């Protein structure tokens, strides 16, 4: 087998790209601190308490891609318990149209004002242009006061179960209490509404400009000026930020039994089937128990694609599930019987089939008409008739968002499934790792929808395999960190290995039957042209402990180190770009390098619950 291609720089080794993320500029006004990244505010804290995850002025293109502004004349100042930031910015859309804006940020010990004035230099087509305010996901269940545009006050709470639709609309101000502080956020310049961004695995509730019930994409006429502002006011006794130990040690706790480890799977598509066949030794070596074979009748797949899937699966001793997208242009019985014929002629052995009507692949936003589609009861019955000996699955080909919004008749299914993707809205390293915080929220919410049904999750990948919100995934030839890109560079580096293990660590509550972790080859692959990528070892390690008794794991800093325990094996991942020290029970302190993973064989005399 060929050896992995050498990485030329540490940045590439860690994240698969030489693109260096600019370090945040940290500013303070007394106890109120924040970071400035790309002209936007992040990690807004008062005395160390995160009160807002971010305030962003974002410009999206016609496919919901985020345009990166060119920033000029950036000026910052801190003086006498106050801070100020000003800059100019320009966005160019894929058609070459230009939008300019100026930003002014004024911060005091208990207040913040972020104002933007923009002008379209050309007719500018966009899906969104304006502010987004992010409240952290750990506010779930916290009382929230909403002031609407007509002045009416609504006393509510941040949703606990993930809200499928906008929990609040026509918002003028949001006020909540946190650690003894009153946090009031005012939004001016347009109509704002909130969506539960945990749907897309973002660790936040997002309040954004321009309701989705209005048409999009839309065009801002050349010469149009706009002014928006976000104001933050803090009341209450200001806490003092606790000092962070410079040499913090993360304690690892192995706890009670919580079932068994799920099966591990990979996707095989017709496009990657030949590459999968050519790299069959790596497939056998990684030891996954499931293959998810993608067949898209709506995209014109036919006999050639089914034969390619049969060759790709080959003689691998794995359970095979046909992930079948149906065109649903006519009679489901006729379409599914034809697909069954293709399976038989290809000699493809199957254990299960999961069916997804093509109209459900694209998201149906609030206010939009649901596309024409046969009732799912009819589709599932037709699948039973065409494949009577196979387990039948359904749910959504796309993400939890769609699974949450279109509730399937799960009683007719043998298992349910959906995928996730962490780069729908943001693609910087920290945002991607923070999506791991949301995995338990997604799984708990899914279990309120389908409490007892076998649950297969995936494919779970950093790169976006399909875009339910636009016409395509975003091209990424330069290997940058781009939202909605299929080819994410971090799949090549240590980052993906750590993120994948971190994802598994957050699935403890769901009792998953299977977790599909990308593909063998291609942009979502665990093997590259030069051989296995770092994520290969993570997938293989998880596959080796499938069906092993699983124990709960806790770490004293879950955003720093993730832990998974199956059988007598403990797997650890450093989720940060800096070395992290850890301690297990009374063992000596050890160190994990940036985004590194480790496998620890637990001694037979190690107590199931380790003391810190």
Image (cartoon, grey):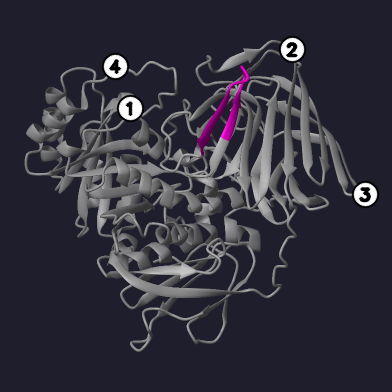
What residue is shown with label 2? 224
**How far apart are the two marked residues, 1 and 3, measured between alpha carbons?**
56 Å
Q: Do the residues labelled 1 and 3 touch (CB within 8 Å)?
A: no
Q: In terms of sequence position, does the residue under pointer 3 or pointer 2 come before the other?
A: 3
**Quadrant in the rendering for residue 67:** top right
Percent coordinates x, y for residue 244 in the rendering: 70, 68
Residue shown at 36%/31% (left/top)? 405
What residue is shown with label 4? 372
Q: In terms of sequence position, does the residue under pointer 1 or pointer 3 come before the other?
A: 3
Residue shown at 66%/42% (left/top)? 54
Q: Please tell me whether the stretch drawn in magenta is mainly helix, strand or loop.
A: strand
Callout 1: few (<14), some (14-19), or many (20+) C-alpha neighbours within 10 Å? many
Spot the residue most to the bottom.
Answer: 605
Q: Compared to 34, does 191 lie above or below?
A: above
What residue is shown with label 3? 80
Frontmost residue, 427 versus 508: 508
Percent coordinates x, y for residue 359 in the rendering: 32, 23
In this rendering, which labeled residue sits more in front, label 3 or label 2? Answer: 3
């Amino acid at each position: 087998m060929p050896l992995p291609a050498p990485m030329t720089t540490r940045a590439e080794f860690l994240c698969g790209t030489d693109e260096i993320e600019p370090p945040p500029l940290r500013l303070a006004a007394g106890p109120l601190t924040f970071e400035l990244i790309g002209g936007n505010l992040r990690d807004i804290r008062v005395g160390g308490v995160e009160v807002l995850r971010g305030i962003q002025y974002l410009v999206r293109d016609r496919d919901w891609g985020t345009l990166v502004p060119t920033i000029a004349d950036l000026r910052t100042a801190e003086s006498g318990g106050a801070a100020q930031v000003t800059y100019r910015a320009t966005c160019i859309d894929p058609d070459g149209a230009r939008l300019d804006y100026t930003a002014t940020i004024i911060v005091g010990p208990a207040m913040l004002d972020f104002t933007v004035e923009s002008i379209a230099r050309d007719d500018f087509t966009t899906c969104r242009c304006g502010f987004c305010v992010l409240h952290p996901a750990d506010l779930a269940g916290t009382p929230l006061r909403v002031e609407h545009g007509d002045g009416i006050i609504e006393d509510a709470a941040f949703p606990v179960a993930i809200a499928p639709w906008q929990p609040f609309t026509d918002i003028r101000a949001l006020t909540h209490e946190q650690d003894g502080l009153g946090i009031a956020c005012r939004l001016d310049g347009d109509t704002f509404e909130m969506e539960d961004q945990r749907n897309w695995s973002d660790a936040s509730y997002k309040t954004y400009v321009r309701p989705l019930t209005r048409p999009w994409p839309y065009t801002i006429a050349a010469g149009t000026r706009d002014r928006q502002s976000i104001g933050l006011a803090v009341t209450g006794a200001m806490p003092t930020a606790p000092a962070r130990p410079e040499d913090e040690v993360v304690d690892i706790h192995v706890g009670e039994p919580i079932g068994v480890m799920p099966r591990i799977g990979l996707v095989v598509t017709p496009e990657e089937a030949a590459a999968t066949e050519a790299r069959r030794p790596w497939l056998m070596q990684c030891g996954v128990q499931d293959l998810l074979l993608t067949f898209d009748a709506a995209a014109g797949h036919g006999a050639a694609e089914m034969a390619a899937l049969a060759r790709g699966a080959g003689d691998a001793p794995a359970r095979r599930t046909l992930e079948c997208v149906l065109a649903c242009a006519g009679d489901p019985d006729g379409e599914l019987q034809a697909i069954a014929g293709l399976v038989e002629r290809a000699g493809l052995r199957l254990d299960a089939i999961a069916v997804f009507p093509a109209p459900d692949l694209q998201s149906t936003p609030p206010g939009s008409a649901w596309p024409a589609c046969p009732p799912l009861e009819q589709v599932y019955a037709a699948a039973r008739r065409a494949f009577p000996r196979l387990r039948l699955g359904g749910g959504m080909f796309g993400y939890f968002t769609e699974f949450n919004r279109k509730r399937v008749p799960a009683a007719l299914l043998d298992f349910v499934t959906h995928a996730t993707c962490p780069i729908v809205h943001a693609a910087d390293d920290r945002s991607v790792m923070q999506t791991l915080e949301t995995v338990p929220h997604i799984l708990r919410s899914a279990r309120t929808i389908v409490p007892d049904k076998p649950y297969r999750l995936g494919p779970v990948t950093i790169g976006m395999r399909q875009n339910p919100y636009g016409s395509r995934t975003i091209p990424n030839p330069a290997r940058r960190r781009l939202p909605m890109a299929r080819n994410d560079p971090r799949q090549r580096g240590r980052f993906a290995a750590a993120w994948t293990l971190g994802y598994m660590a957050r699935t403890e509550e769901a009792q998953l039957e299977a977790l599909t972790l990308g593909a063998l080859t291609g942009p979502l692959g665990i093997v590259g042209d030069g051989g296995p990528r770092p994520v290969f070892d993570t997938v293989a390690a998880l596959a080796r402990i499938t069906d092993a008794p699983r124990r709960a794991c806790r770490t004293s800093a879950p955003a720093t180190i993730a832990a998974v325990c199956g059988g007598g094996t403990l797997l650890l991942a450093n989720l940060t770009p800096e070395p992290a020290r850890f301690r297990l029970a009374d063992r000596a302190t050890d160190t994990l390098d940036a985004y590194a993973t480790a496998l620890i064989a637990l001694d037979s005399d190690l107590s199931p619950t380790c003391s810190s």
